[in-house]
Image (spheres, helix red, strand yellow):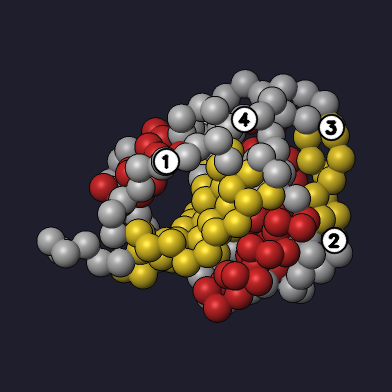
Amino acid sequence: MASVKNSSKGSKGQSGQVRIIGGQWRSRKLPVHDVEGLRPTTDRVKETVFNWLAPYVVDADCLDLFAGSGGLSFEALSRYAQSALLLEKDRTAAKQLCQNLALLKCTNADVVNSDSLTFLAKTATKKFSLVFIDPPFRKNLLEQSCQLLEQNDWLTDDAIIYLEMESELAQVNLPPNWQCLREKNAGQVTYSVWQRQIPENS
């Protein structure tokens, strides 16, 4: 069973649910706490994204950098990802993630109550084949996260990376060996799927 590690102060209150839209837990609804900056991926976007990710999810080792509601990881686990590590800085949200994993009787996922940039700054202890990066908007977290993933060897050779960002970001400095597979806009959000290529100097 997942357990919260480390500590950070979180806000209180509960606001709504996240729904799993496919796989073994299809249509299950899970509670989500009202946490500042929490912006769950909409069902419409999630359905499109997981259609894109269908060839890569089964047996994937997933890393969810700004887990929030956990909607992306829960969806991947429902569709038979091998494992998931969910990073969430807010302690209240991290506790809810653990509770929701318990509700699902999910034993192949862990929650770490940690700042994602701090976590990624250390040398990798595991390589991940599928990474979700959906940070709070306007905090300048996306580029740093991507660079740290590459620099500290957190990714498998052909890892798939999902990015969700504010559409106003016209230019994002991503590792040069990442190739964009799919991209789409939905209102103020741009979401895309990238695949890592082995760097030429490896």
Residue 69 is situated, as x and y percent measured from the top left of the image, at 70, 44
Amino acid of disc 1: Gln
CB-based contact (under 8 Å), mark 1 and mark 2: no
Residue 171 disc label: 1
Q: Nearer the viewer, residue 9 or 65?
A: 65
Amino acid of disc 2: Arg
CB-based contact (under 8 Å), mark 2 and mark 3: no
Amino acid of disc 3: Gln
Amino acid of disc 4: Asp
Q: Earlier in the sequence, mark 4 or mark 3?
A: 3
Per the image, the residue denoted by label 2 is 28
**Secondary-structure class at tag 4:** loop
Residue 44 is situated, as x and y percent measured from the top left of the image, at 76, 58
Q: Crowding at label 2, few (<14), some or many (≥20) Cα neighbours within 10 Å?
A: some
**Secondary-structure class at tag 2:** loop
Instruction: Tell us which disc is closer to us: 1 or 3.
Output: 1
Instruction: Tell us which disc is closer to us: 1 or 2.
Output: 1
Q: State whether residue 181 appears in this view.
A: yes
Q: Which of marks 1 and 2 is nearer the N terminus?
A: 2
Residue 90 disc label: 4
From the viewer's perspective, is 74 left or right of 193?
Answer: right
Per the image, the residue denoted by label 3 is 14
From the viewer's perspective, is 34 left or right of 157?
Answer: right
Instruction: For marks 1 and 3, give the CA distance.
Output: 35 Å
Instruction: For marks 2 and 4, give the CA distance.
Output: 24 Å
